[in-house]
Amino acid sequence: MGENTLLDILEIKKVLPHRFPFLLIDRIIELEKGKRVVAIKNITVNEVFSQEYYGGLYPMQGVLQVEAMAQTAAFLILDAEGNEGKLAYFSNIERVRFRKPALAGDQLRIEVELVKLRSRAGKFKGCCYIGDEKTCEATFSCMLAPDQSSSFTE
């Protein structure tokens, strides 16, 4: 694993159902189970969402930064004992602030803390950073539900 990596992409994929092109966290660098998690997303020009904008910029749109926070929160809650075989669904987004674009070549640090947990729902506060500069922040909630994917037939 890379420097400062607690959990790599293979470990993350054991917990989250997201896959390319929509898995938006690359590694976990800090984890306080049931309390707080810090993840990293390396933004490249090869991302499916990365389109050239004015001046040759390749931004990661703010709403995708919010999704990266939600996936980081989902990791925190799904990694908890007793939540194996469940899925976490976005249920509410509040107080979103987009402060600065994240561009190809940037390393996005995603910090999420659990504010409140009930049996089937969690409320989180998240922030994204490039270096020490905040790019996005939000308060949001998710609901836990059983994974029904095995009941679908092709």
Image (spheres, helix red, strand yellow):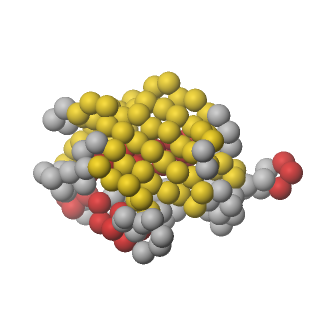
The residue under the point 48% across, 70% down is 3
The residue under the point 18% across, 56% down is 84
Tell me the quadrant of the picture where the N terminus can be found.
bottom left
Q: Can residue 74 be seen from the camera position used here?
A: no
Q: Taking 152 as reference, is 34 above or below it?
A: above
Q: 33 or 15, which is in the foreground? A: 33
The residue under the point 41% across, 34% down is 125
47 relative position to 32: left or right: right
> Residue 4: where, in percent of width, then height?
45, 65
Toward the left, the furthest residue is 82
13 relative position to 96: left or right: left
153 relative position to 43: left or right: left
Q: Taking 1 as reference, is 66 above or below it?
A: above
Q: 96 or 125, which is in the foreground? A: 125
> Residue 11: where, in percent of width, then height?
33, 68
Picture quadrant where residue 141 is located = top left
Tell me the quadrant of the picture where the C terminus can be found.
bottom left
The residue under the point 61% across, 49% down is 130
Toward the top, the furthest residue is 95
Q: Taking 75 as reference, is 139 above or below it?
A: above
Q: Can residue 141 be seen from the camera position used here?
A: yes
Toward the bottom, the furthest residue is 1
> Residue 6: where, in percent of width, then height?
37, 64
Toward the right, the furthest residue is 55
57 relative position to 81: left or right: right
> Residue 56: where, in percent of width, then height?
83, 56
